Amino acid sequence: MADVRLEKVSKTYEKHTVFHDLDLTAYDGECFTLLGPSGCGKTVIMRLIAGFEQPSSGSIFIGDTLVSSLEAGVHLPPESRRIGVVFQDYAVWPHKTVFDNVIYPLRIQKIPKDEAVRRTNAAIESVNLHGLENRLPYQLSGGQQQRVALARALVSNPGIMLLDEPLCNLDANLREEMRFEIKELQRTTGVTILYVTHDQEIALALSDRIAIMDDGGRIRQVGTPYEIFENPSDSYVYLFMGVSNFIPVRAENNQVYIEGTDQPLDDPPEDTMPAGRRFVAACRPTDVELTRNGAPVSGIVVRRNFLGPIIDYRVTIGGSEVRVQQGTREALERNLIFDEGEPCGVRFLALQWYDSDSSEERVQA
């Protein structure tokens, strides 16, 4: 097992620069996720670490070993890096059985037959495919085929597993099942996992740490799932990590008011705001509460959607529309079911403050 470290890594294709001077470290034994929009360079990073491509500049280390550097003339081939790779399309051979798919890397490595069979059976067992060894891929579900790909990557005892969107072709129930299995595999094997996805839910469920990338190939924040979700470094990260409200506000008389109203917001930023300054208050729909009285802000319900366990509202306050989600059971018990067109009180339970410019940047990204 080993850390994976990228130092000042850049990658350029002709005139297009994917990223420039990228620094990144995944620690030994952790599940580290690259999370960002399509086209931001996540898969390119995976290919550089695997050795399928070489960086245009900078250095890549696995442990203390320099595995790739154009300047130093070093490029260790993929088969020498002790890395297992799982792709989003499974890439299992349709004419080979589960057993033959999994044992294939060991045959290429000319591992003695008895050891190869033992390791193959252990890998198949580790992904809960025992008893399916003689089945062909067309006889398996999508989740089972993905397990075959995982077992094939594990059978060579890699120090690092690279998983490139491996769950995106599965239905919702299988995605949930497989993400728990991947986490369990990491726990039992101790392998370092680098996971690429644009799915925030999978990243939060699987990761020890997450790196948020923007579509310019920049890393905006690295942290634990809790740190990323609860304390985003900027509005880009805040909006990328889930449904969000960005409410235009202004500073006046050491108070913060919603634009287009004379309604102040509780808990304004600690630092004193210059009079007339425009910025935004950000919150999640679940961090907004509707009341019938006593709230500092008033609004009008313009839309109500019943979604089973939650009720999803759109509420206008001045010229702003705020999305609110409240638990159905609690709303029923407290007589807080509002009709469209009905006035309501609005209480914000958690607000974060960002400059208007940074919010606009994220919306356009």
Image (cartoon, rainbow, N blue to C red):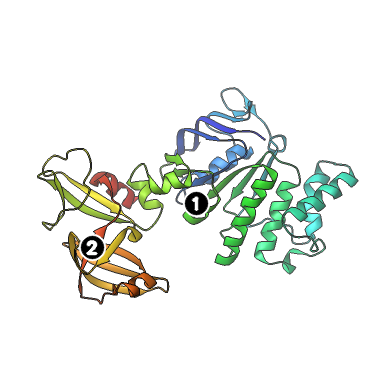
Q: Secondary structure at mark 2?
A: strand
Q: Residue at x 72, y 47 (%)?
A: 154
Mark 1 secondary-structure assignment: helix
Instruction: Identify the mark nearer the N-term, 2 or 1.
Output: 1
Q: Amino acid at mark 1?
A: Leu
Is residue 4 positioned above or below 127 on the image? above
Crowding around mark 1 (Cα neighbors within 10 Å: few <14, some 14 to 19, many 20+) is some
Q: Quadrant of residue 219?
A: top left
Please identify, in this view, whether the residue under mark 2 or under mark 1 is nearer the observer: 2
Tell me the residue at 22%/48% (across/down).
267
- The residue most toward the bottom is 339
- Image height check: is 14 above or below 281? above
Q: Are marks 2 and 1 in contact (CB under 8 Å)?
A: no
Q: Which residue is mark 1?
A: 204
Percent position of residue 176, x then y: 57, 61
Q: Residue at x 74, y 69 (%)?
A: 139
Q: Name the amino acid, label 2.
A: Val
Q: Relative to residue 265, is residue 12 drawn left or right?
A: right
Instruction: Report the residue that reaches farthest toward the front.
Output: 333
Residue 16, image x and y in percent?
45, 40
Camera-side residue: 344 or 284? 344
- Residue 218 seen from this side: no
Q: Residues within 10 Å of mark 2 (few under 14, many from 20)?
A: many
* Residue topped by disc 2: 346
Residue 14 appears in the picture as rendered: yes
Toward the viewer: 176 or 57? 176
Res. 217 mark: none
Residue 168 versus residue 344 in the image, above or below: above
Q: Relative to 101, is 167 on the left or the right?
A: left
Tell which residue pokes out farthest to the top in this image. Answer: 72
Tell me the residue at 65%/62% (across/down): 143
Marks 2/1: CA distance?
A: 29 Å
